[in-house]
Amino acid sequence: MSWKRTKVLRLESKDGKVLEADEYCMRAMSEIINDTFKMMGTNNYFSENENNPLVLLVEKVDSKTLAMVIEWCENHSHQQGKCTTPEELKAWDAEFIKGLDRNLTFHLERAAGILQIKELYKHMMKTSIDQLLTSLKEVVPDLPKITYTYEPRPARTDYNYPIRSYIDRINLETN
C-alpha cells in the first residue's frame, strides 16, 4: 500500500539534523505535537509564507532515534499506515524490534515519553522488560516465570500540586 504525505512537518533533533515527517500522522500519534498546534491557535503548521514551514525542536532526542520514531508513527498511523492488516503490523513490529539493543530501546522509550506517543511508549516498555527478563534468564536459568501488566498512571492535571500541598499543610497547622 503506497501513500503520500499531505503536509510535511519538520522536526529538529538535538544534534541539529532536521527530519521531515507527515504532519497528519505525527499529530495523530503525538499528543505534544498536537497540543503545540492547538496552543498556536491554528490548524495550519506553516508560517505566513506557505513555502516556509516552521521547525519544531525536539531537543532531547537524537536524529537516529527521532528517525525511528517517525518511521514507527508513519507505519502505525491508522489513516496512512503501510500495513493494512493486524498480522502485517505484528510482523512489521517484530522486525522493528529485532534489531534493537537495550540502549536503543531506552532511547526510543524516552523519545516516546517526551513526545507523548502512548502506543510506542507502551511497546518499548514491554520490549525493555522482555530484554531484561531474557538477560536475567541467561544469568539465572531457574528463574520462575514472571508476568507483568502495564497500567499507565493517570495524567497529572494539577501542575501546582507541590505549592498547593504546602499551602494546605500551613492551613492545617494554623487551624
Image: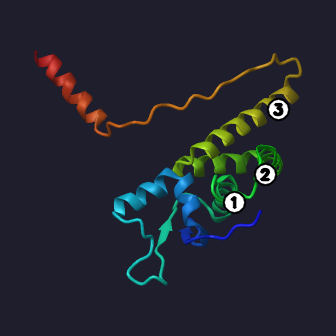
Question: Which residue does the numbered mark 1 point to in the structure image?
Answer: 71
* Mark before the other along the chain sequence, 3 or 1: 1
Question: Which residue does the numbered mark 3 point to in the structure image?
Answer: 134
Q: Around disc 1, counting alpha carbons within 10 Å, would you say few (fewer than 14), some (14 to 19), or many (20 or more)?
A: few
Disc 1 to disc 2: CB gap under 8 Å: yes
Say which residue appears at 68% left-offset and 41% top-offset: 123
Q: Is residue 128 left or right of residue 9?
A: right
Residue type beneath disc 2:
Phe
Visual colour scheme = rainbow
> Which quarter shows the C terminus?
top left
Residue type beneath disc 1:
Glu
Image location of residue 154, percent across then percent down: 46, 32
Say which residue appears at 80% left-offset and 28% top-offset: 136
Which marked residue is nearer to the observer: mark 2 or mark 3?
2
Q: Around disc 3, counting alpha carbons within 10 Å, would you say few (fewer than 14), some (14 to 19), or many (20 or more)?
A: few
Q: Is residue 30 above or below residue 135?
A: below
Disc 2 to disc 3: CB gap under 8 Å: no
Image location of residue 14, percent across then percent down: 56, 65
Say which residue appears at 59% left-offset and 52% top-offset: 111
Question: Which residue does the numbered mark 2 point to in the structure image?
Answer: 96
Residue type beneath disc 3:
Thr
Query: Which quarter of the figure has residue 18?
Result: bottom right
Q: Secondary structure at mark 3?
A: helix
- Between the residue at mark 1 and the residue at mark 2, the CA separation in whole angstroms equals 10 Å
- Between the residue at mark 2 and the residue at mark 3, the CA separation in whole angstroms equals 18 Å
Q: Secondary structure at mark 1?
A: helix
Q: Is residue 134 above or below residue 44?
A: above
Q: Secondary structure at mark 2?
A: helix
Image location of residue 91, percent across then percent down: 83, 47
* Mark before the other along the chain sequence, 1 or 2: 1
Q: Is residue 142 left or right of residue 24?
A: right
Disc 3 to disc 1: CB gap under 8 Å: no
